Image (cartoon, rainbow, N blue to C red):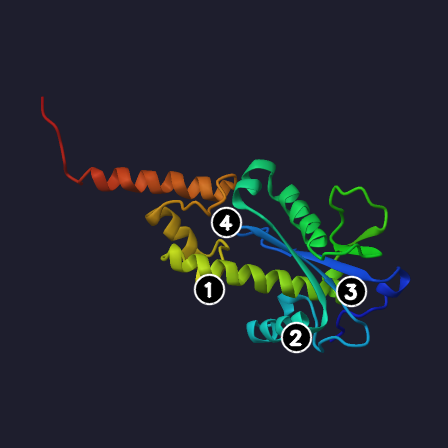
Amino acid sequence: MKRPCFKIEREFAQPLAGVDEAGCAPLAGPVVAAAVVLDRDHFPRGIDDSKKLDLASREAIFGRLQKVARIGVGIASVEEIDSINIFWARMLAMQRAVEALGFEPAFVLVDGNRLPGWERTDAKAIVAGDTKCRSIAAASIVAKVTRDRIMLDHSRTYPGYGWETNRGYPTPHHCRALIELGCTPLHRRSFNLVRERLAMGRQHEMELASPLGHTTTG
């Protein structure tokens, strides 16, 4: 199977940063982006789109990247997601990730079809970039592992939602927990599915408060 490579990246100035994010679809938690600058002569083997790698492979490559790559991580909070919507929160996280590198890369390649709202011309959006460009794929791994670890930590504070395994995505377990346990401060209230499950939860509480067979007489 063909993996991401440096073919596209060689067209642009160096040092080049690849940028990707993780966590747009979940019902809870922040969106996390990463910017990664690889040394083309010294990088971990096996870099691929994070969605194609299992947990152990992602963790192993992440650990090696920390030793040989320049990495910046940017986070947009749940409050920001609810305030400016998930699309612009994603853009904000990616912009912060590049800023977090601590230096100005000569060029930036971003996964997707839109660039963040920064004032720079030395950047390009690459559709499905995490499957084509090695630096973007590396960023996808860093973003995914970082966010997964954040949600694992939050699962200890808010047990019952299954975040230790579903990472905040709308699994059946998570959706049932929203109805039964309600909303945490980390749930994205701007998401329709969260609002719908909260409404179902309120209905569930009303049904529990009204025992079957109860009647009133005048």
Q: Which mark is residue 27?
A: 4
The one nearer the camera, 145 or 218, is 145
Q: Residue at x 49, y 55 (%)?
A: 168
Please provide percent x and percent y for residue 186.
46, 47
Residue at position x 61%, y 37% in the image: 84
N-terminal of the pair, mark 1 or mark 3, is 3
Mark 1 and mark 3: Cα distance apart in space: 28 Å
First along the sequence among labels 4 and 3: 4
Which one is in front in this view, the residue at disc 2 or the one at disc 3? 2
From the image, tell me which residue sits under label 3: 133
Q: Tell me the distance, in whole angstroms, between the alpha carbons under discs 2 and 3.
A: 18 Å
Residue 1 in percent (x, y) is at 73, 76
Q: Residue at x 52, y 63 (%)?
A: 149
- Cα distance in 3D space between marks 4 and 3: 29 Å
Question: Which amino acid does the dot numbered 2 rest on?
Answer: Arg
Under mark 4, the amino acid is: Leu
Q: Tell me if mark 2 has few (under 14), some (14-19) or many (20+) residues whose alpha carbon lies within 10 angstroms of its own.
A: few
Task: Return the residue at label 2.
Answer: 64
Q: Which residue is mark 1?
A: 165
From the viewer's perspective, tell me whether residue 182 is left or right of residue 4.
Answer: left
Label 4 sits on a secondary structure element that is loop
The residues bearing labels 4 and 2 have C-alpha atoms spaced at a distance of 30 Å
Sequence-wise first label, 2 or 1? 2
Q: CB of mark 4 within 8 Å of CB of mark 3?
A: no
Callout 3 amino acid: Cys
Q: Looking at the rendering, which quadrant does residue 155 occupy?
A: bottom left
Point out the frontmost of discs 2 and 1: 2
Report the amino acid beneath label 1.
Answer: Thr
Q: Secondary structure at mark 3?
A: loop
What secondary structure is marked by label 2? helix
- Mark positioned earlier in the residue sequence (4 or 1): 4
Q: Position of residue 137 (x, y in %)?
A: 71, 65
